Image (tube, rainbow, N blue to C red):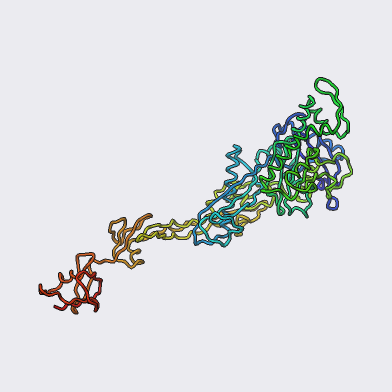
Amino acid sequence: MDNRDIIFALDIGTRVVVGIVGIENNGKFQVLAVEQMEHESRAMFDGQVHDIDKVANVVEKIKRRLEDSLNIKLTEVCIAAAGRSLKTQFARAEKNIDEEHEITVEDINNLELEALEIAQNSIISQSGVTRYHTVGYTVSNYYLNSFPITNLKGHKGREIAVEILATFLPYDVVEGLYAAVKKAGLEVSYITLEPIAAINVAIPPEIRMLNIALVDIGAGTSDIAISKEGNIIAYSMVPYAGDEITESIATHFLTDFNTAEKIKKSTKKEIKFKDVLNIEHKITKEEVMEIIAPQVKVLAQKICEEIIKYNGKSPSAVFLVGGSSNLPNLPEEIASILNLPINRVSVRDIKSVEILDYKGKTLKGPESITPIGIAYSAMINKKKDFIKVSIDNKTIKIFNIKNPTVMDALVAINYDSKNLIVQNGEDLVIKLNGQKVVIKGEEGTPPKIYVNGSLANLKTHINDGDKITIVKGQKGQDATITAGELLKQQKGKLIFVNDSKVDKNYVIKNGDEIVIKEDLTSFVVTVNGKEVELKGKEEYLFVDVFNFIDLKLDNNKVPEMKVNGRRASYTDILKPGDNIEIEI
């Protein structure tokens, strides 16, 4: 047997470590050997390694037993990060836009990147942990002018917004797992997430387009993954699981935890045990079910609340895996709360796993789904756990849990999404003759993204060794205009800014209040066939003409007066070019 064909998978759980060795056989995963061992003491808490030496010790023992049973040398291992370590965060990003601008794909991608940054910053502020791998995100809603819309592309408006549901994995979780297996003499060849591993074997590909909640119920936590349209849209965790059920038994019967655990797991009709006072008891399975029923109901309620919180409604089906999914009446309680038919809540064990070739007895219940899933995921993916890419000559590592994109790389280096927005010049906003007027700044040159020298965008998929280059855009010139240029546009002759007259060289400033008038201080009229220039006033009445012509009036007679052929009076207002006739 060629060691290169060997797949060694480890499920490093909070209480138990399971190791599986197998090979691919006609599209199925053929199990060659299985070993499992409990931690000697609390070395793991909620899926995170707390004592590297203790975890490494258990891993090394399992590795050695598998090597001895198969007479091989194991050097590489496939692992998974616990779903309970994942952080899921809602985030919303909003942006004001020019009402004449047609929304582009780049605008939408930049908006999503900004929302992803907001989500990551929220997680950091809540947890205090500063470094995270981006696992993925899904768009919940787009908005145009505050109204929901299916697709922003091509629309125009004042404001666009997006709401996303993003998931992150702390660096420390991955680094702790790596350190523990390395100390045991192993290198990680593949890493995935426990919920993804479980889905790969528990949910057949033909039904992954459905809205399904997968719940991995372990000892300390119940981990949740929700799938929709072929993707996992959310991860969550309930800090309530099998241990709470065990503790209710221990409290009721006054036993230690291990005895209570045996009572919980017993399938016998009649169960015998001794309490801490060494008093012997004999109870039936029905009595145990009656005692734990309230806690099972609480567990079901907490799981359902979390599913609805992130899914927005009841899913089409719920699949249960993990050792505590066998709790009596748990599927019935979940079905009742979610208003689902009982056959839509299913406990998945290895009998339902069609891709498995296994004749042994160690792997049997729903607790075996995740370790099998880790091995099978490695078998079908055969890709690196991390990829290395460079951004502007800076090398970074990206968690290869999905098909990573340029956006994932930028989030990994905390790239400021504002640098990808086209920087137009500042607009000039003024009030002209009582009306608001906006003079547009010059359009900027958009930034460009290249992957290996080819033009790309935020959604371009990247591979190991890719080189990402970002060419910064150029900001457009700010809007500027002089009083003279404004006068030409408005065909005026006098300009007043903030109630003061200015000359043509004055540079208009943001917020200026401007009034443009015709220059009435000097203009020419025709009086009885001769041109006469009127000077010294902003407005002239007919009577003012007599101050500029040599004409004697008879005090006892009103002259006949006409303007442009029409009879006029002394108080008529004159305009440039008027033709005036006066007869005495």
462 w.r.t. 529: above or below: above
Residue 63 percent location from the top left of the image = 81, 37
The structure residue drawn at horizontal position 73% and vertical position 46%, both measured from the top left corner, is: 338
The structure residue drawn at horizontal position 65% and vertical position 45%, both measured from the top left corner, is: 167
Give the number of marks. Answer: 0
Q: With 561 as the anchor, is 395 left or right in this view?
A: right
| Residue at far top of view | 277
Q: Nearer the viewer, residue 478 or 321?
A: 321
Residue 379 percent location from the top left of the image = 79, 49
Q: Is residue 552 visible?
A: no
Q: With 300 as the anchor, is 562 left or right in this view?
A: left
Quadrant of the rendered structure where residue 221 is? Answer: top right
317 w.r.t. 57: above or below: below
- Quadrant housing the C terminus: bottom left
Residue 361 percent location from the top left of the image = 88, 40
Q: Nearer the viewer, residue 59 or 368?
A: 368
Quadrant of the rendered structure where residue 129 is? Answer: top right
Q: Is residue 567 visible?
A: yes
Q: With 253 as the anchor, is 534 left or right in this view?
A: left
38 w.r.t. 189: above or below: above
Residue 499 percent location from the top left of the image = 29, 56
